[in-house]
Image (cartoon, grey):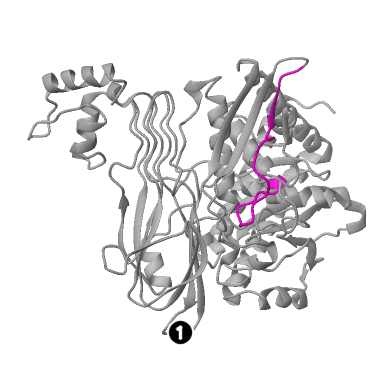
Amino acid sequence: MAVDLITAEVVAHGLQSIVEEMGVALVRSAYSTNIKERRDCSCALFAPDGRLVALAEHIPIHLGSMQGLMVQIAEDLGAWALQPGDVIIANDPYQGGGSHLPDVTLLQPVFHEGELVAFVTNIAHWSDVGGRSPGVGTAGDSTEVWQEGLRIPPIRIVAQGRVRHDLLDLLLLNMRDREERLGDFRAQIAALRLGERRLLELFRRYGVATMAASIAELLDYSERRLRTALCRLPEGTYRFADAMDDDGVSEEPLPIQVAVTVSHHPEPTIAFDFTGTAPQAAGGINMVRSALLATVYYAVKAVVAPDVPPNAGFQRPIRVHAPEGSLVNAREPAAVGGRTDTCQRVVDAILGALSQAVPERVVAASNGATTAIIFGGTEPLSGRSFVYVEALGGGMGARADRDGMDGVQVHITNTSNLPVEAMEMEYPLRVLRHGLVPDSGGPGRFRGGLAIVKEIQALAPVLFSAHADRHRLPPWGLMGGLPGGRGRFVLNPGTPQERVLRSKLSGLLIRRGEVLRVQTAGGGGFGPPWERDPARVAQDCVQGKVSREQARRVYGVVLTAEGEVDEAATAALRARMGAAGGT
């Protein structure tokens, strides 16, 4: 059936509004701070055959879990014999399409006049799904997936509108803070019901034939737009290599290599080959293929076609090869809790490769990891168990025409920070310091973004787990830009008991009164530092982002006692720096 483009556009925006509204409902009705405050959730719509139709602007990595589950269901759709009101739950990265266990996906079929017309789905990061310590499913030092929590293959958790409470009780019995888990589950169900209602309103208004034709046109439109955008990239193969600090078990770095091939004939495509990447790790930073695909799709959208809807049509021109059993395409039972660190590094590697083709479109390496911190224990007054999860941002890499943003999450994560008031109200923790780290942005003609520092005091004994990276290998700069600052975890900073912790750990006891300092990494710079506008360096010093010492030593800018640029001294110093190659 042909459909006029105006109708197709109206339907496309209607579909997008549905997934966005589902996300709002999920956030506003959730129990955990990780969802109601930090918005660690996502929503999407799929066609009956499993094709992605609409994706809310939430967390890019979550597409991997939702699409992974959808593909599994679509491959054996008849055997499921789905009915109106059914809901499927899953989280397993090997048997359920997931990418790590805390990301719990719910999927519901939508029927119109007895016909299956779509699927609505959402995903929420549950703060705990069992495992050997609180929130360990998000930590990075497990050595097998069973240590990370309860594995849930695709199971019908709601049958024709009725929750299977025996099965739900079995799941919750294996998790900490069951009341909070139940509240988040109910919020996810409510969001699915809302999506179903809104979608049926569209189908009743336009009919099945017009909706199907509009969706087909939407997918074809995204494909055409991406292929057209690929024609603007120079043909060729571009290679880049980066590395993870370690895997939380050994001290050895793990290389990530990518070759990006842009072809214009016989039709425009872009291919990614990760041959040469390290074998799957002993620790919990492995990626499964669904996570890799979501990461690659994000990178293509960010660099090549940021304004194109990310649906199944968008994915058609993209090819991905990754050796099975590698760090970016792991086999069972590899641990995957800290997979976002590796996902972020994959994006950096892709950007590094594409910087050879379109340097004006990419950013230097960003904080390069998801600094996830997890505290678990018992609230002294209520006696209730708690698990607090937060992913901290850091410095965004600079680009060809502007500085990197300070203290933000980048690339495949997109959650908010947890407000200090919410943390102190909900958990026996106190924030002593929360701010930016001076001199942590990579120097350059355009400066990398600054890192975040957060100091947290335990008001009761708690267990601490985490995954992070860029504690050893700093985020690199581009075109002569310098690296950003490294991250670190420090227990009891500034005291005789000060101790630097590993970047990936779980179940560390922090006693009452002890302080943990969490520092993320800064972003890499772009262009030689001595080419930065001296007035901007002076402004950075006034704002406390760059020290006077770094201004002189790295940027070659001499300031007067009043903070003004000493132009004569600066010109002389920069001339010497340029002659010496920036030293």
Tell me the residue that label 1 is attached to. 382
Q: Residue at x 45, y 32 (%)?
A: 364
Q: Is residue 201 visible?
A: no
Above or below, 498 against 449 in this view is below
Q: Residue at x 57, y 61 (%)?
A: 141
Above or below, 434 against 406 in this view is below
- Name the one closer to the observer, 401 or 370: 370
Q: Position of residue 465 (x, y in %)?
A: 50, 65
Determine the secondary structure under disc 1. Answer: loop
Q: Is residue 238 left or right of residue 417?
A: right
Based on the picture, tell me whether residue 512 belongs to the magenta stretch: no
- Quadrant placement of the C terminus: top left
- Name the one closer to the observer, 74 or 92: 92
Above or below, 144 against 578 in this view is below
Q: Amino acid at mark 1?
A: Ser
- Dominant secondary-structure state across the stretch colored magenta: loop
Q: Residue at x 28, y 44 (%)?
A: 438
Q: Is residue 53 visible?
A: yes
| Location of residue 518 (image quadrant) | bottom left
Based on the picture, tell me whether residue 283 belongs to the magenta stretch: yes
Q: Position of residue 417 (x, y in %)?
A: 43, 55
Q: How many marks?
A: 1
Q: Position of residue 248 (x, y in %)?
A: 55, 57
Q: Which residues are magenta?
A: 267-290
- Name the one closer to the observer, 222 or 435: 435
Residue at the farthest left position: 561
Q: Position of residue 550 (x, y in %)?
A: 24, 36
- Quadrant placement of the N terminus: top right
Q: Is residue 8 left or right of residue 253?
A: right
Q: Residues within 10 Å of mark 1 (few under 14, many from 20)?
A: few
- Name the one closer to the observer, 233 or 323: 323
Above or below, 15 against 139 in this view is above
